[in-house]
Image (cartoon, rainbow, N blue to C red):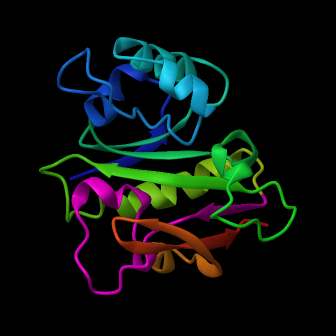
């Protein structure tokens, strides 16, 4: 098995990871934290995928894709925090004024879990942010302890996976997802 993580600049690989089974479905497409709420509610069905296609083909790709033997198996959303709704969040604090990047979504395709894909995605997102000049990268994972987390709601990641990647607890938050508190984890890239 060969695992590689690359910037999400090839849109055709992204629907496999984020797209709906039905083209008219209104799934997240990892836009909920990326775009203003009004636009997020206006984009319906195929328009959501078209918006993501524009991001992939535009300047800075909207995240990274993990490939196992050339097949897309995982996704991580990463961008400057200032370009996300985390910039205005009342539940996830700002630690300081550094222009940090945010890593807020990790998805691994069914059939590819428990193979280290999420760890590869975290490392790939860190490299991507570093390559784009980020002084630090933040994540807002679930602090679930030993409790099980529903796969659908585990998109924020788990604290232990970020700790394993060298992130440190930087702040508590008032955000709760799937009944678990979220914490602000940070990795200095300088």
Q: From this view, report whether residue 88 is shown above or below residue 43.
A: below
Quarter of the view holding residue 70? top left
Quarter of the view holding residue 136? bottom right
Q: From this view, report whether residue 182 is shown above or below residue 128.
A: below
Q: Residue furthest bottom?
A: 146
Q: From this view, report whether residue 36 is shown above or below residue 180.
A: above
Point 48% across, 33% down: residue: 8
| Foreground of the two, 112 or 185 | 185
Q: Is residue 72 magenta?
A: no
The magenta stretch is 135-161
Q: Which image quarter holds the C terminus?
A: bottom right
Point 72% across, 65% down: residue: 189
Find residue 30 and report its horizontal and vertical position in percent: 45, 38
Left or right: where 180 falls relative to 68 = right
Left or right: where 84 falls relative to 77 = right
Find residue 176 and report its horizontal and vertical position in percent: 46, 68
| Foreground of the two, 121 or 97 | 97
Point 35% across, 20% down: residue: 12
């Amino acid at each position: 098995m060969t695992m590689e993580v690359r910037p999400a600049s090839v849109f055709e690989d992204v629907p496999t990871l984020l797209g709906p089974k039905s083209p008219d479905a209104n799934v997240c497409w990892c836009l909920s934290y990326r775009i203003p709420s009004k636009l997020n509610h206006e984009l319906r069905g195929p328009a959501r995928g078209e918006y993501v296609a524009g991001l992939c083909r535009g300047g800075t790709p909207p995240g990274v894709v993990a490939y196992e033997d050339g097949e897309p198996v995982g996704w991580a959303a990463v961008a400057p925090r200032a370009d996300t709704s985390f910039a205005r969040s009342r539940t996830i604090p700002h630690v300081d004024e550094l222009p940090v990047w945010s890593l807020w979504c990790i998805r691994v395709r069914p059939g590819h879990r428990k193979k280290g894909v999420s760890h590869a995605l975290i490392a790939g997102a860190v490299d991507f942010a570093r390559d784009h000049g980020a002084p630090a990268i933040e994540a807002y994972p679930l602090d679930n302890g030993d409790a099980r987390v529903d796969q659908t709601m585990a998109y924020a990641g788990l604290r232990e996976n970020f700790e394993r990647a060298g992130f440190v607890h930087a702040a508590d938050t008032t955000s709760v997802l799937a009944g678990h508190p979220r914490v602000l984890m940070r990795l200095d890239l300088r």
